[in-house]
Amino acid sequence: MNDLELQAGKEGMVWENNPVLMQLLGLSPVLAVSSTLVYGIGLGVATFFVCVLSCLTASVLKETIPHKWRLVWYMLILASYTTLVETISQLYFYPLFLRLSIYLPLICCNVAILIRMETVAAQSHWPIATLDAAKTGSGFLIALILLAACRELLVSGTILANWQLLLSASSELSTVASNQDDRQFFRFANTQAGVLILLGLLVALLNSLSQLTSSTAIDESENLVPAKRARVTGRLSKE
C-alpha cells in the first residue's frame, strides 16, 4: 500500500486530512472555479451534498452491492446525486449554474468522494459513514473558500462580490447584479501558474501549522511524564 492509499484511508477530517490541502485530490475544479468566492461556495456546497448523500447510500446498500461490481455502483450513485444537484441548480440558481459550467456535472468524477465511499462508507454503518462524508465535504468546501477568497482579494480587491448569485432569483436580476468591475490589481493570481503557486502556499502554511501543533503536543506530553530513577537493592544470587 502506497502513501496515497494510507493517507486516504485515514479518518476524514476538516484540517488534518483535508482532501484538497493534504491529500491533493480533486484539484481540477478547485483550480478552475476558485476565481471568485461566490463560485467557490456554489461548487463547494454542491460537492458537500453529493458527498454526504453518496456515502450514506453506499453505506446503506453495502450488503446488497456485489463486491466485484462495487465501483460501477459507486459511479452510478455519484452520477445520480450529481444529476439531482445539477437539476436543482438549473431550476433555482440558473445564472450560477451557467458560471460553474462543466465543473458542476463533473462532481461525479471527484476521486475524493470515491475514495471515501470505498474506504469508509462500504465498511461502516451509515452514521459513521455520514459523519466521515460530512467532514470530507466540509474540508473540500473550506479549501475552496480559502483559495477563492485569496484570489478574489488579490485580483479585484473585493470579497464575496456578486453575492446575489447565491440567492434563488430570476435570471434577469442575477444577470444585472453580476456586472463586475474590470479593475484587476494582481492579475498573476488569475492565471494557471498563479493559482498553483497560491495553492502551494496554502498547503505549505497548513503543513507548517500542523507540524507546529504536533511538536508542541509532543513536548507537552514529554513534560508531563517525569523521569523515575530505579533503585536496586540486595544481592544477585548465582545458581
Image (tube, rainbow, N blue to C red):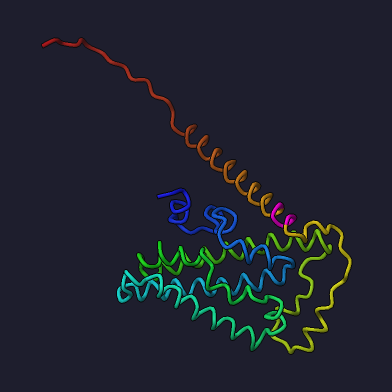
Count up the numbered dots. Answer: 0
Residue at left offset 66%, top offset 50% = 200
Relative to 13, say whether 98 is above or below: below
Residue at left offset 44%, top offset 32% = 225
Residue at left offset 40%, top offset 67% = 121
Q: Magenta stretch?
A: 193-197
Which quadrant is home to the C terminus? top left
Residue at left offset 46%, top offset 63% = 115
Relative to 211, say whether 28 is above or below: below
Q: Position of residue 25 (x, y in %)?
A: 55, 59
Quarter holding residue 230: top left
Residue 2 placement, left or right of 69 = right
Q: Position of residue 222 (x, y in %)?
A: 47, 33
Magenta span: predominant SS is helix
Relative to 138, say whether 95 is above or below: below
Q: Position of residue 214 (x, y in %)?
A: 54, 42
Relative to 225, say whether 35 is above or below: below
Instruction: Compare residues 145 and 196 and report the one nearer the observer.
Output: 196
Instruction: Compare residues 155 and 49 and report the one nearer the observer.
Output: 155
Residue 22 placement, left or right of 198 = left
